[in-house]
Image: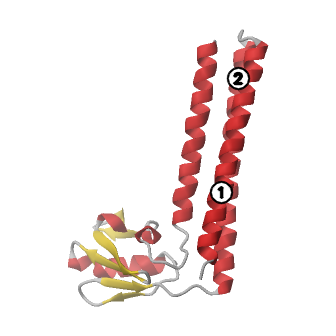
Amino acid sequence: MIEQLNNVIKDTEATMAKAVDHLSSELAKIRAGKANPSMLDSVFVDYYGTSTALAQIGNISTPDPRSLVIQPWEKPLLGAIEKAIVNANLGFTPQNDGNIIRINIPPLTEERRNQLVKMSKQEAEQGKVAIRNIRKDMMESIKKLVKDGLAEDEGKNGETKVQEQTDKYIRKIDEILVAKEKEIMTV
């Protein structure tokens, strides 16, 4: 029984770490004024009838902090890539010169920065909800173990450890959010 409890606690740690990693990747997609290839992660291009991630059909680079360059591996895809970027509604205007697509990243206005901070806070709150749901599931698992014969003291210790992990990962999310807000608000 104690081994099962230890497995529940390990699972809690691993699952909460994945939730924080997911939050980090979601926040990376929120642009903070600098060009970043991950800004185009949500863009999918119709590649011979299949919806394909932009990064899989071309090279995305950042020649300077204010622009992105997309070099497709097949030139006939330029039009489809340009259309996909416009349809993704990212606020970018792609410029097609026949060989590459260039995207100039406009500087952020104060209003847009505030919107991005708000979006970041929403993502962080979703991360916290995920952490709390993991805690709830793990607490139920521990209660089931106690019901199946685990000593109540061990169960309480397990619940305490799960709560400590929950607090630790909630603090991590808060730290990530503060860093992202600072990055967005830095002009």
Which residue is painted at 45% across and 77% down in the image? 35
Residue 150, how many percent across, how many down?
71, 12
The percent coordinates of residue 48 (x first, y second) are 27, 67
Q: Nearer the viewer, residue 22 or 72?
A: 22
- What residue is shown at x 53% (from left), y 73% (from top)? 31
Q: Secondary structure at mark 1?
A: helix
Label 2: which secondary element: helix
Residue appearing at x 61%, y 34% in the figure: 12
Q: Residue furthest top?
A: 149
Quarter residue 18 falls in: top right
- Mark 2 is on which residue type? Ile
Image height check: is 185 above or below 15?
A: below
| Residue located beneath label 2 in the image | 142
Quick one: 152 or 172, which is closer to the camera? 172
Along the horizontal axis of the image, is 60 left or right of 36?
A: left
The crowd level at tag 2 (other Cα within 10 Å; few <14, some 14-19, many 20+) is many
Mark 1 or mark 2, whichever is nearer to me: 1
Q: In the rendering, which numbered label is found on residue 107?
A: none
**Residue 36 relative to residue 156: left or right:** left
Which image quadrant for residue 70?
A: bottom left
Left or right of 145 on screen, residue 95:
left
Residue pointed to by mark 1: 175
Q: Is residue 174 visible?
A: yes
Q: Position of residue 16 (x, y in %)?
A: 60, 41
Residue 87 in the image: x percent, y percent? 47, 78
